[in-house]
Image: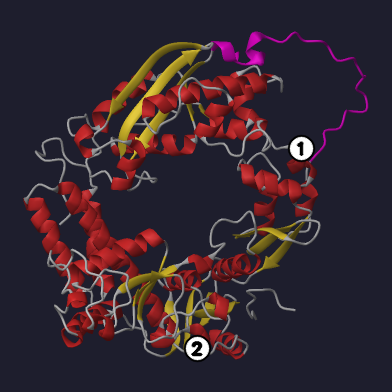
Amino acid sequence: MPEPGGLSVVSSTVPVMPANAAPHAPQAVQGTLDDLGTPLADVTFVVVDLETTGGSARDSAITEIGAVKVRGGVELGEFGTLVDPGAPIPPFITALTGITQQMVYAAPKFAEVLPAFLEFARGCVLVAHNAPFDVGFLKAACAAQDRPWPGFPVVDTVSLARRVLSRDEVPNCKLGTLARHFRAATTPNHRALDDARATVEVLHGLLERIGSFGVTSLEELRGFARAPTPEQRGKRHLADDVPSAPGVYLFEDARGEVLYVGKSGDLRSRVRSYFTGAETRWRAREMVGLAERVRPIVCATALEAEVRELRLIAAHKPRYNRRSKHPERAVWLKLTDEPFPRLSIVRERRADGAAYLGPLGSRRQAEEAQAALHEAVPLRQCTQRLTLSLVARGKARTCALGDLGRCGAPCTGGEDAGAYAVHAAAARTVMAGDVRPVVAAATARIGRLAAELRYEEAAAQRDRLAAFVRAAARAQRLTALAGCAQLVAARPAPGGGWEVSVVRHGRLAAAGTVPRGAAPRPYVDALIATAETVLPELGGGPDGIPAGAESGGAGAEEMECVLRWLDGPGTFLVELDGVWTCPVHGAEGARERLERAYERAHAPVEPSAPVSHRPLR
């Protein structure tokens, strides 16, 4: 049977003792204190925690920093301050941390805070809970100021906890969980200094546990978290038969259940890394302990490997895969098919005559896109099924939106079905491709809010517009690709020659390579002849909307992989059966303008700039 998600594809030297050398007994050499490393009791730790406006140092900023300096179990000092991020704080961050825009209005910029923190931590070992996150922001801040990163030794309490605590002791390694486990006096509350104090107590608890493993120096401590587990060392033989080629690998347990699916440009090298200290992820180490075999699948191109990985994850739903494990959880924004249509967020798209926008990655994105569309088109926002007879009898429920002018109030007879149909037609036009009404309405509202100095509300409106435009652009690109019966493209291969892909209704139907110096046409013809058959109703649903991998067609993630490959440098079309275009007034152009505006809004502000809080226009 073919694999789920399958595609058609055309020494070391040992020193030798000289023969005339006389054997001699090894001489005992007394070690020095330097050989023992730096005792942990003499190490000065600076435990640091950051609060930020988001999860990425590229497009987020620091709002608070807290740090505690300790040595030998004794606190030596604390460092803490709020920070002006130079951009609006998202509402959900305010709800999580309690840090509002007003709290940071008079706070210093991080450019002023960073030198003081670096001096506070000079010569110390940095400790953080999930250290890559905090250290990543600190390194980005140094780079933004053209400061060299001091190269602090770093200890991550998450990695240490995963090495010494079992699942029977703690269900997870979150800071709150570990603080309760070690009976910390400070409860983490998503404020930087309190979280740093809690992390200090967690660090001390972990150091006590690590002492039983014979770890007594800083050097041993830093190597302890990276050391492979006995399970990892005992499973190294599983990589023996894995080839050095691009493709997909599947970890399976003794019953043949797929535990994890991954891809790599070099299968052997990647699989071997799971059995060394380079693999520090706790879930991956646990998975290796359960694995009994590794099944490699060699692929012709990197795109084929990426698509195979998505299909195999969707087919097997491995317990240790998080990405794309449940592609069916995508949501859609639907304009219902009834006398007085309304916008609804649904889990699946049906052939019911309604208009759809999506798929969207989360319900939150769908809600923001829905709010942006409501801003432009006065559709009713109530959830009742409003029929003509219900309105005629005066039995429909009413709401306050009609009084506020946000709805024509068809429930009370304020608008008849004919007048309301104009709004529904406008919404369908927007969802089909013309996003100008939404962009115009949102821009006008942002301008009014900015003029009234209501910057947080203006930022929220901007984010709603961004969610809608990105969702619409994604849907239009996917729909255009799904409408092509066949698309054949080629791009230069890394080692010479060409990579060739055959795409039918958005689904990767075949992938192969043309050797360097060979005539490409015979290879392309052979690939097309052996490509998978994809029917229109499988590759694209009504109105060209992608149907999804569960019906045998192309899922949204697969189509996005194909689009990224097509957008890559050097890629050109070989054949095209269909029309591959996006709407003239579609969302792609608006998305590009919006992304440039985001870049300007998050660009570093010169010290002479008089205003630091500006809405995006």
Task: Name the residue: 24% across, 48% down.
Answer: 602
Residue 344 seen in render: yes
Task: Name the residue: 25% across, 70% down.
Answer: 397
Q: Residue furthest left?
A: 451
Which disc number belongs to residue 563? none
Q: Which of pointers 2 and 1 indicates the residue nearer the eye?
A: 2
Which disc number belongs to residue 537? 2
Task: Name the residue: 83% across, 11% down.
Answer: 27
Query: Mark 2: which secondary structure?
Result: helix
Q: Is residue 313 above or below residue 478?
A: above
Residue 54 in the magenta stretch? The answer is no
Whether residue 163 sits left or right of residue 438 in the image: it is: right
Residue 447 percent location from the top left of the image? 10, 57
Q: Give the class, few, some or many, for how many residues have Cα within 10 Å of label 1's Cα (few <14, many ≥20).
A: few
Residue placed under numbered mark 1 in the picture? 230
Amino acid at the residue labelled 2: Glu
> Range of the magenta residues?
13-42
Residue 366 percent location from the top left of the image? 35, 64
Q: Is residue 314 above or below residue 278?
A: below
Observer-nearest of 358 and 561: 358
Residue 29 in the magenta stretch? The answer is yes
In whole angstroms, how far apart are the C-alphas of marks 2 and 1?
51 Å
Observer-nearest of 141 and 269: 141
Work out which quarter of the rendered image holds the C terminus and state it: bottom left
